[in-house]
Image (tube, grey):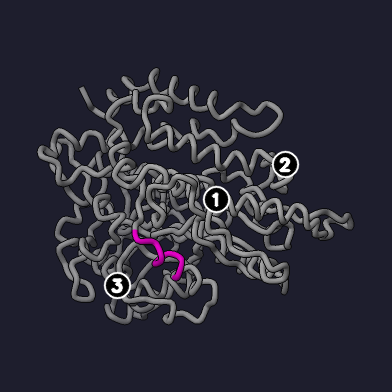
Amino acid sequence: MKKSIKFLLCTAMCSAILLPLSACSKTKNDESVLNVICLSKGYGNGWIKTIAEKFEEEHPGYTVNLEGAIAEAPSLIKTHINSKNNIDDLYISVGNDWKTYAAQGKFASLDDLIEQEVDGVKIKDKVTTEYSESIYFPDKNGDVHTYRLPWTAGVGGIYYNKKMFETYGWEIPKTYDELITLCNTIVDANIEFSSGGTAKAVKPFVYTGQNIDYFDYTVYTWWAQLSGEDSIKEFMQYGSPDNYNANTNETYGNLKKATEMWKNIFGNPKYVMDDGNGMSNHTAQTNFNNGCAAMMFNGDWVYNEILNYKIDNKDFELAIMPTPVASDAKETSITYTIGEDQYIAIPESSIKKDLAKDFIKLMVSDYGCGVFLNEAHGLLAYKSSLTANDTTDAFMQNLLTVKTGYSKAFTNYPTVRGTSDIKNSTKMLYLSSLIDIWGTSALRPYGKLLGSNAKPVEDAFNDISGEISRSWQNWKIQAGIK
């Protein structure tokens, strides 16, 4: 068989209405074709094309079908996994619905795969430390299995225009107080840029557009600095609605403090280019790229997206700073890792599970990590020998240096292994599918804290606490907790 990657992306109409993969490609479930659906947004799809080419070289006679490598991957997966004629073999995507699919038995067990070695290390040990517990999930009997592996170890935080900092001699703030001082310095400098023929002043920050969850990455890191890793892990057991009372629960009270730190910046119109009303993520990032602001809260995929904008601005160079340390921090070298909702999984219906597992092994290998580093400009959630010397890209060298500079990293997946009776704890994993840190995405407070009708942080957190209390019992019922 001729070795080639099918990368047709269907047609605009096919992507829009999300026809099943077989309807797009007219492909039958050929045992020599590995059908992959992979999200191709921020990190692009060049990296998976490269890995697929390598896979085909190592598996003569087999073809990797990447027609499903599209931005609409989560919706496509939802359509296919509920179909009686699903021919998919591998999913690489995002969304907390992976927990639902796992609980419903729609994902194949990967228990045997995590015991296999890649680069001389068992896959379960190759997973980065912050994700080591997230590879386990209970079945309906409470027995723990692996149905999903993590995808990326995203690095969120404060990104800045390195050229602008160098031009004006601004120091990278090491503490939150220094960050506020820097904001005032930028405002006082009154640096002008032209927008639509009108001169405007450069702001310290540009808003994130409509992706307000991007603020989480820095706010959660400040939260961990204030509370410490152990307190965060205890909170994420979601043991009681009372934990969401910021006035009585110290850990949640520290999340409130971290949110107030954010509000001090984004609630000040002198500091922010836009209040978030109507600006798309693309527009916000383009404004940042064009020099309208010195800094932006974002995730590491912003670099790959900016590269694709192809804006030739010689006065812009992206960099990321270590998150400035909060006052009264208990831990100063800890960071939140993005990606708890991401997954690599095999549908239970696949007739090529072993082939799919071979593809996963290649993807998480040092080779695969290197490809992702240099082509997706991101980090996979797997330990590797990669260092800043393994890339010639200045931003990626900067990103690796910042990431490896933290002594601890955490994600928002509840830890249950190692408890005295795991079967009594695993149901809480189902509950975490429903509530997460903010309760639900609708309860994320940022949007309520800005604009003409902005609430005080105290009121926003009281609203969250009240909604949690009203919804808790129903969430427990949904999670199967008596």
Q: Can residue 22 be seen by looking at this rendering?
A: no
The label number, if any, that marks residue 365 in the structure image? 3
- SS at mark 3 in the image: loop
Query: Residue 8: x, y in percent?
Result: 50, 66
- SS at mark 1 in the image: helix
Amino acid marked by disc 1: Tyr
Q: Residue at x 27, y 78 (%)?
A: 59
Magenta segment's dominant SS is helix
Q: Residue furthest top?
A: 470
Up/down of 4 relative to 244, above or below: below
Q: Earlier in the sequence, mark 1 or mark 3?
A: 1
Which quarter of the figure is the C terminus placed in? top left
Number of marks = 3
Neighbour tally class for label 1: few under 14, some 14-19, many 20 plus, Cα within 10 Å: some
Task: Choose between 121 and 200: the one closer to the eye.
Answer: 200
Task: Choose between 89 and 287: the one closer to the eye.
Answer: 287
- The answer to whether residue 161 is left or right of residue 406 is right
- The answer to whether residue 132 is left or right of residue 167 is left
Query: Residue 307: x, y in percent?
Result: 61, 69
Q: Quadrant of residue 352?
A: bottom left
The label number, if any, that marks residue 269 in the structure image? 2
Amino acid marked by disc 2: Pro
Query: Residue 469: x, y in percent?
Result: 38, 20
Q: Which residue is mark 1?
A: 176
Neighbour tally class for label 2: few under 14, some 14-19, many 20 plus, Cα within 10 Å: some
Amino acid marked by disc 3: Ser
Q: Residue at x 61, y 40 (%)?
A: 264
